[in-house]
Amino acid sequence: MKYPPKHHQDSDLNHILEVIKTYPLATIISVKDNAPHITHLPLVYERGKLIGHIDIYNPQTELLKNNNDITVLFYGPQCYISPSIFTTTQLPTYNYIRVHLKGKVNAIEDKEALKQSLISMTEFLEAPNPKYTLEPDNPRLEANLSYIKMFEINITHWEGKFKLSQDKHPKDTKAAREELIKRSQESIKQFLDNLF
């Protein structure tokens, strides 16, 4: 049997891009000497590429150039699904949305391109109701350009993993969807209440 099951795979590019746009904080993974280097950064999708920025002191920075291989993970919503919500007999399960990408990464050394990219990323992250605009003449922006590297990832492989109880009875699939929405909102509040 093929794994993961076909009904948990989603190759629809529009679905994958929606996850990337809605949940832009990605996990980027590079490997050097059989050791993984892992960083969490927001990435913006632009015409078949992902654009990101990294602190020059991050050890992974040196691996984000020269057409090196990279793996990128995006995380959509997730939650445990109790059999108690189903209308038919089921076992406990866990539903989630993930996107796995592979690609080749290159550094972009142009300072003006970096500046414009930081401004564009801020606009993207502030949307749809921006309350802040990163101005090109912002002195803090100018002062920090030397400490940030821009990179782009040319995507070579796309994989959507959408485990949403699609193999269940339609009423159970709908109940699992509603549970994912409800539990996601509740779990964020409970988690933050426990921390602060």
Image (spheres, rainbow, N blue to C red):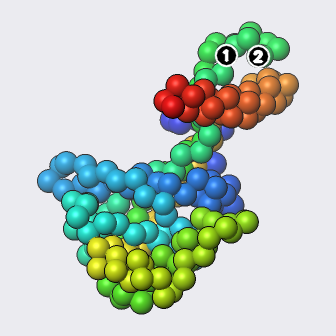
x, y percentage for residue 8?
62, 38
Residue 46 visible: no
Q: Which residue lies furthest to the left in this view?
A: 33
Identify the disc placed on residue 69: none
Name above or below for residue 24 compared with residue 88.
Answer: below
Picture quadrant of residue 175: top right
Callout 1, which amino acid? Ser
53 sits left or right of 11 in the view: left
Identify the disc placed on residue 82: 1
Name above or below for residue 22 compared with residue 162.
Answer: below
How many numbered discs, if any?
2
Residue 42 visible: yes
Name above or below for residue 78 compared with residue 147.
Answer: above
Q: Residue visible at 67% across and 16% down?
A: 82
Q: Residue visible at 73% across and 66% down?
A: 129
Where is mark 2, residue-wise?
85
In the image, 81 versus 172, the foreground residue is: 81
Are the residues flagged by discs 2 and 1 in contact, CB closer than 8 Å?
yes
Element at badge 1?
Answer: loop
x, y percentage for residue 9?
60, 44
x, y percentage for residue 161?
57, 43
Element at badge 2?
Answer: helix
